[in-house]
């Protein structure tokens, strides 16, 4: 039986040429799979037809938008996932859901190999291949750009020679990856990290310098999941889409960062993620109101590790899944409303209310109704500070105390 | 010899009355110490005189501004200290430097006790008392508001009876603490956490809704410390002040958060910290460029613990000091320029350049000059993903593999 | 209606006197509850009768042994809980199950207060009271020894005056707390931390210096839980008891440590926990065989925090429960046999076998059958070491490279 | 000029054949460097001569024993470095000091390449190559066994053909690596992880089953470094050697573990490290006495990361060096005496005394002289437990409280 290869197909030059290139290099039949994670752009049926025209024996479009939002974006939101405290994991999140559909197709079509269009110096090759091996350890991986030396020049020549139905003349200077959670932009100009992004790199966000009137929005969460916006029930996908639209219109969620890639190099990345940034800000503040202090403190370390693992391509790893159980358990009471003002690039929480809040007005107020018993403070401070006191006494004993400064202080008597 | 008490004196009603109140309750002489941490407001010489008029036997003003910036704000900047990822430790930072001057005064004036004006339900009482015991385990602490039940009504009555030179009629609804690193605002209206802050709570920042033209600034760091702004050399104090002025004018650095107090309650806090927020954003991005990946990843956990310790009043604790050595060691190469645009509440990094950068254009570029050897990627991925692969094979063996979804995929043959 | 107080009753002098002491001080009726956590010693029916004779209006014995083993010891085993890497949480584990039974009794008997016999300087008062407030925030706590100043001398006088049926003449120099998971011993002699424990402090373990012949045991785990010993099915309680017997006979599990109490002081503690120590050693090694590397590495941090929380009285806290979900998720594959030799104070794992093992003989062997593809290593090392290489190149550039040592090396030519 | 290669030379078959093999494959001259890290065994001058006889153009022996003990073993001791809580990093510690001497030789002899005898599936290849690139990013690495496919059979054939002065007939079934910090043993028999080690695998330790009389030893530390044993001043090297001798005679320090290699596989390893195990046990207990609680708790996480980094070949990495500064800062007061009994495989601390102790007899004692003010406890517990209490009240409100068990409790009245 002929070998079969499932190819992650984008409709672009590299993967279009890849179909024939793989077939020639390996003798295998190529099945093209395009996964819709909300990237927008070209009609996917057109893309599917193109794959067949380029020589794929089968071509398949998987609509993974709702699945992506529910099973990938929402866990990231629960984990407040921000790589380097800034980047909400745009590409890193979509790779595992694409991988899942590739593997599903491989099983369905009896393929032994999964191919992708990544180069050999990025994170995505790792995310694809470790993802694939984590779902199907028996499948092989192939990256024509990397493994079969499919350069851009060769691709253009191949497309022209074979009259493939794909544009080869116009070179897009931007390398873009986008999905419903956000949009990543790389371009040669930005490789000089002193250069500022130009206005034309952005499409998910309008210029925050000239915002329309402020937009106030109330997001309702249930156990960490956004379930309504301004009182209207939404699915996870709708929540992200709606917030993309409204926060994007206010220029919220532009990110410009030098980041550490898994393959050991630093790279400069520009992102737009208006919905993600606004939702995470709202979710974090609702957690401030509903999580117990020590749970919240430990969760930060879990969030960091979760984010690193996902960035590093370990979505399906045992540790990532164990961390998910922790995060899910913390979300039980993360329910309530958060009111935000979206304006001029800012997503600012201005109010929060929750039946499951741990904020207790009567304990917090300095006004009438105060129920906090201040008589406990003295004993608390004495015992709480005891280890520091004992350590300080030792410092004094050994002459290692903090230097208090030198010289006489001015006194009233010297004034007179 | 008469007992002496050093009182942390602010010039306000509570501590003014506290002078006589302590004297009457304990029979001690009171020495009033006002510490200038850049809080602005009243003339400190006036405050000093008022203390004497209220019965202090000595009154002393310590100018701790440069010391506060250099020894307290800069370490916080190096640690990117943001409690709950949002709040740059305004009050928590100033307490230890005030404590140091109180203890110094206690030693100079032969006092056995240090007093402060805090209530029994906040963090500051803990920061004062644990700080004092950490510098001088032999000193006693006294909090008249908490320990001697000095309520506001009693304070007004006392001030009127004793004709103290202090305003008692006007009740300021805001409880404010401010220093050069920022400003903290509490007020009854905000104790309802659904209420948004009103415009009148802010003084360090102008309204970001109506910003002046964008302000571009270049901050030069040397080993983590800001040493020049737009090419002009600055001291740490000048750096913070200048950034307060410029970022404040653009409405940068307003914070509205429900936070976890050390004493176990959640409270709603509003802060302004324009300089701190802008400097930390610049410093973090310079770290992105200059720290090795694993060093940066571990540093986040250190930053969190550092921040918690300082928030929790443990500035002088052994762990805090050991963490300082870690942080300082990471800063060796955090040198270079960061260009930011300050505008409309945003402090956005647009460029960074550093001789000590680990960003390598030739490794990062996808253009000509690429020196990254992509042939290593395959081997890397195989070994990097091996533990996940083995775990996945076990999942498959035991039927615990990820569900790939059900149903036939549409195929070309079914189309036809 | 008369107030009622539920007292944690041990049958000893303090709590026997406490019955009357509480009644006199508060006017309440006292219900005595003794909880059997496998502490052995006196017959619990005798103890129950004594409580009634001392004035309790009700007395109740709860047999919590199986519950304690299953719901408290087993989670500790899954978490490899060793405070300071040494102490398997003997007393800290039993407090929450006792608390649960006290609260249950309080509800059943309509009590408003729960009392315990702890002093004011130990951990157990915190574990009792935070535990109680975590199950029943409305209940009050009372500690007669601490709050009602019930000293030993006063207790003896009270017992004699009231002719209580309790021995008062013999003063036991040892303060003991024991349960099925272990035994804690404090005594004045050991408060000098230079003194070694004497032989008479131990009862759970025989002297390891003169062991009987070595005892080989095979423990079978299922998802982290010991389910068979030498092929014979056991309940959790039986597993702990059997291992106490066999490891105890070999002198395994004696611990002598200076530990950090929650109340800020260091104290010297001696423990015996033969079963716990042997079971944890076996469990850890089975985890070495069955956990994925990153899961195992992160779990260590979780284990430490879990252990600190439980030591610090936070058994019922939200964070502790979220950590439990993480730990439980890691245990899915911790199944198989561990063979140990118990002898002369040592519990040494000598073999492990598991169907869910991640140890792969063919990958590990250096012999025929090796399936590890060494050709991947070069690429792995290049990329794995890249961040260190870039950092090193910077060190060299700035003259901060590692000093290689000075002076000429001897060479063959200088020999000749 | 002829290329030169510095080879890490052990004197064994592989590296002896490697000399000629490298020369033939690359045309380079080979300089053999043997580094003495206390591995014992053959006379190093004999080894040096053999290298020359096998074709090396230069051969050099570096006595790195004192340096290894002081700059590598002592930092590991300060960090209580135990991989997987069991293995004190025997081989992982020696690699960086060997690397340093290889690089030094490469600089001295003008070599462009450093070679080592490791295979492609172990940790040591990574430690060598990442170490080399971390000291000299310009040097190339070569591993003849891995890169030039130098198998054992080929090595024997080559040695016979070329009449090399090396034994080829006797195949040692054990693969051994040893240094003054310990000894690592691999052998085919142990690759079945159910098999127990046989007695003949051990040489650093005598059988703990038949120990001589117990040996009591007092170790004096100064700032974390052992400086005297039984009152006699020792260098770090002498401390380790003396403890190897005395603890080894008692069978202390045998380790049998399945461990996670950096290259993604689990392997079974047997170690002996009598001195390391005894010294770490003593050091840990002295830390229990001298470190402040929070410093000690955070240090555990640092220790784990330090140990992982060193195990993973990152000795010279920026993070490892920053962690060193943290660890060093914690050691300031880790001074004093620890008394241990070495016997029957056990190294048991029986006493500790330190002028810098934080153990305070008067705070700890339950006897006369108690200075702990128990009146603070109530206030402490109230505030300490407040977050748990608020969370519990919420659980109750939402019906998520802990299940207290069902059914009527037996009461006295039902008895009667």
Image (tube, coloured by chain):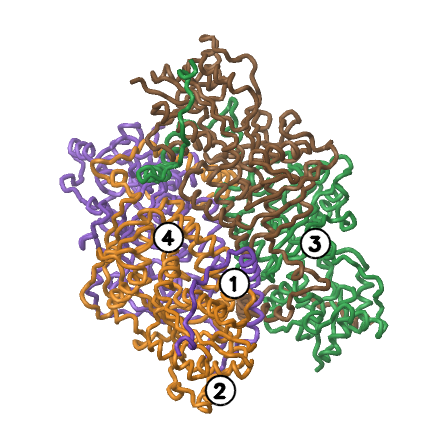
Chain colours: A purple, B orange, C green, D brown
Between A180 and D84, the residue placed more toward the observer is D84
Residue carrying label 4: A67
Residue C192 tag number: 3
Residue carrying label 2: B154
**Is the Cβ of the residue at disc 2 closer than 8 Å to that at disc 1?**
no
In the rendered image, the quadrant that contains the N terminus of chain B is: bottom right
- Measured in 3D between alpha carbons, the distance from the residue under mark 4 to the one under mark 3, in whole angstroms, is 64 Å
Question: Horizontal placement of B206 versus A226: left or right?
Answer: left
Q: Which residue is the extreme one toward the left?
A: A169
Spot occupied by residue A124 in the image (x, y as percentages of width and height): 33, 42
Residue A14, quarter of picture: top left
Residue D117, quarter of picture: top left
Question: Horizontal placement of C247 versus A300: left or right?
Answer: right
Please, is residue C223 above or below residue D17 in the view? below
Residue B134 tag number: 1
- At horizontal 50% and vertical 11% (from top left) the residue drawn is D165
Q: Which residue is the extreme one toward the bottom?
A: B161
Give me the chain letter of mark 3.
C
Q: Secondary structure at mark 1?
A: helix
Give me the chain letter of mark 2.
B
Give me the chain letter of mark 1.
B
Of the residues tagged 2 and 1, which is closer to the observer? Answer: 1
Disc 3 crowd rating (10 Å Cα; few below 14, some 14-19, many 20+) is some
């Amino acid at each position: 039986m002929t070998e079969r290869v499932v190819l992650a197909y984008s409709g672009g030059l590299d993967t279009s040429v890849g179909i024939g290139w793989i077939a020639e290099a390996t003798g295998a039949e190529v099945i093209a799979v395009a996964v819709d994670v909300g990237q927008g752009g070209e009609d996917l049926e057109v893309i599917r037809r193109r794959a067949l025209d380029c020589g794929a024996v089968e071509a398949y479009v998987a609509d993974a938008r709702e699945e992506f939002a529910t099973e990938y974006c929402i866990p990231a939101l629960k984990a407040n996932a921000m790589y380097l405290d800034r980047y909400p994991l745009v590409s890193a999140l979509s790779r595992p859901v694409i991988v899942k559909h590739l593997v599903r197709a491989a099983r369905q079509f009896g393929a032994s190999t999964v191919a992708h269009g990544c180069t050999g110096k990025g994170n995505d090759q790792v995310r694809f291949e470790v993802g694939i091996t984590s779902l199907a350890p028996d499948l092989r991986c192939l990256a024509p750009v990397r493994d079969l030396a499919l350069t851009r020049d060769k691709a253009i020549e191949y497309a022209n020679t074979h009259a493939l139905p794909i544009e080869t003349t116009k070179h897009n200077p931007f390398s873009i990856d986008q999905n419903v959670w956000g949009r990543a932009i790389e371009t040669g100009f930005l490789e000089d990290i002193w250069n500022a992004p130009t206005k034309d790199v952005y499409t998910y966000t309008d210029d925050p310098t000239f915002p329309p009137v402020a937009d106030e929005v109330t997001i309702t969460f249930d156990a960490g999941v956004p379930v309504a916006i301004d009182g209207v029930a939404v699915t996870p996908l709708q929540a992200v889409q709606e917030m993309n639209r409204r926060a994007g219109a206010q220029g919220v969620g532009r990110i410009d960062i030098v980041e550490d890639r898994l393959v050991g190099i630093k790279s400069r990345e520009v992102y737009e993620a208006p919905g993600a940034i606004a939702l995470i800000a709202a979710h974090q503040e609702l957690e401030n109101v509903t999580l117990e202090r020590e749970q919240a403190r430990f969760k930060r370390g879990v969030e960091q590790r979760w984010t690193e693992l996902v960035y590093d391509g370990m979505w399906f790893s045992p540790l990532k899944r164990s961390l998910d159980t922790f995060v899910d358990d913390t979300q039980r009471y993360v329910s309530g409303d958060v009111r935000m003002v979206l304006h001029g690039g800012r997503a600012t929480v201005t109010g929060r209310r929750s039946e499951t809040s741990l904020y207790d007005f009567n304990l917090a107020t300095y006004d009438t109704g105060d129920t906090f018993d201040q008589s406990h403070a003295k004993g608390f401070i004495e015992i709480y500070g005891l280890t520091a006191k004992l350590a300080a006494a030792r410092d004094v004993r050994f002459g290692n105390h903090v230097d208090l400064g030198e010289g006489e202080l001015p006194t009233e008597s010297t004034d007179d």
